[in-house]
Amino acid sequence: MSNLRIVKGARYLTLIVLAFALLGVVLNSTGLLDAERAEGTKIKYLVATLPTVFYLAAIWMIQHAHAAIAKGEAVEAALATLLEHLGICLFLGGVARVFGELWLVRLLLGVSTSQGIFDVAAITLGCVGLLLFVLARPLRDAVRARAELAEIL
């Protein structure tokens, strides 16, 4: 029973983190915190939120996994799904940071920029995302094998 309470508490804490992160992104990207920006700068700030959308989706996936475990879903199955979805979100967020931002700025503003941003944190998150995505398959296979063995026994 206490594990269930811990999972529910973690889920609510994750939702609080998500709400504050989303509020910060909205305030920053809309210019409400700094209304005296030039038009091009506003577009750059808005485009810079692209990776953040994927990172917020990753936080949502974590919350979703907490909810699945709290509802009684097998931990291994919830973790396999979480790893797969979290990996995709982190990878896409890293790619959006390194390449997507610059390409969108180039497309929207016509500004000539480099081909990518050498952001080690975003590159690392993208690589971790790929790793999580790859690790999800053996875990999902293990869950299926365990269910199959349970049927036999």
Image: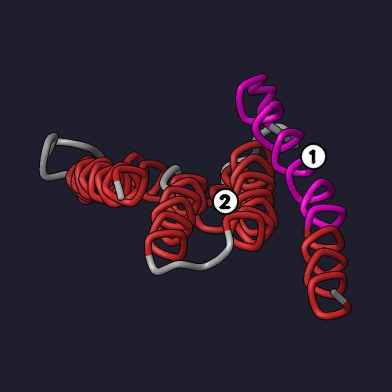
Circle number at residue 9: none
Mark 2 is on which residue type? Gly
In the rendered structure, the answer to whether residue 88 lies left or right of residue 150 reads left
* Span of residues in magenta: 117-139
For disc 2, the marked residue is: 110
Residue 116, given in percent of the width and then of the height, sits at: 71, 34
- Viewer-proximal residue, 24 or 77? 77
Residue 148 belongs to the span the image colors magenta: no
Residue 127, given in percent of the width and then of the height, sits at: 76, 34
Residue 125 belongs to the span the image colors magenta: yes
Disc tally is 2
Circle number at residue 131: 1
Dot 1 or dot 2, earlier in sequence: 2
Crowding at label 1, few (<14), some or many (≥20) Cα neighbours within 10 Å?
some
Image point 54% across, 48% down: which residue?
105
- Viewer-proximal residue, 33 or 152? 152
Image point 50% across, 50% down: which residue?
58
